[in-house]
Image: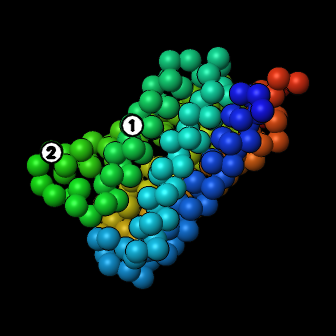
Amino acid sequence: MSSSSLVRFGGGLASAAAGILLLLGHVLNLGGDPEYGTVPGASSVLVAHIILVVALVALYAAQADESGLLGSLGMVLGVIGTTLVSGAEVDAVFAAGVSGMLSVLGGLAFFIGLILFGIATMRAGVFPRWAGLLLIVGDIVFGAGDFTGSAAPVVFVVGALITCAGFVWLGVALLSGRSGVSSQQPGRVS
C-alpha cells in the first residue's frame, strides 16, 4: 500500500470515526455525572481524541503544500492539545498542580489548534471549505459550553455535532480521493 493510499484510507477513516465517536461520547454523557459524564461516554470521547491524532496528521498531509505555516501550526497545536486532552480524560490527571495545568493547557491548545486548522483548511482549498468552517464553529460552540452553566451538556453536544459533521465530511473527502492525496489524479475539492 502506498503512503498516499495509507493517508487517504487510514486518515479518512480516522477522521470520520473520531467525529462520530466524539459526538456519541457527548450524547452518552448527557445523563451522567455533571463533571465526568458516564463511563461509556467518557470512554468514547477518550478514544475519539486518540484517533484524532491520526486524523489531524493525515488531513494535514493531504493539504500540507497549500495550508502553509497556519496549517502546520494548527496541526501541531491540535495534536498536542488532543494528546493532553486524552490524558485529561483519565480521572487521576485532574489532580491539582502540574497535571491540572496540563489539562487546561491541553484544552486550550486543542481549541486554538482546531480553529487554526479549520482556517488553514478553508484557505488551502483542498477539502470542502464548509468542512473547515464546521470545525471552527463546532469548536467555538463547544468551548462556549464551559460558560453556559446548567445548559453546558446540551451545548457540548451541539458543538460536538457540528465538529463531528466537519470531521466526517473531511474524512469522506479524503476517502473519496478528491482531496489531492491520490497520486492518480490530484485535484481540489470545493
Residue found farthest to the left? 97
Given residues 117 and 38, the one toward you in this image is 38
The quadrant holding residue 7 is: top right
Using residue 126 as the reference point, say whether residue 136 is left or right of it: left
Residue found farthest to the bottom? 31
For the rendered model, the colour scheme is rainbow
Sooner in the amino-acid sequence: mark 2 or mark 1 = 1
The quadrant holding residue 67 is: top right
Residue 102 spot, x, y in % from top left: 24, 44
Q: Is residue 113 above or below residue 153?
A: above
- Count of numbered labels shown in the rendering: 2
Label placed on residue 80: 1
Give the Cα distance between marks 2 and 1. 16 Å
Could you tell me the amino acid type at mark 2? Answer: Val
| Residue under the point 63% across and 27% down | 61
Q: Is residue 170 above or below residue 25?
A: above
Which residue position holds label 2?
Answer: 98
Residue 63 spot, x, y in % from top left: 66, 26
Could you tell me the amino acid type at mark 1? Answer: Ile
Neighbour class for label 1 at 10 Å: few (<14), some, many (≥20)? some
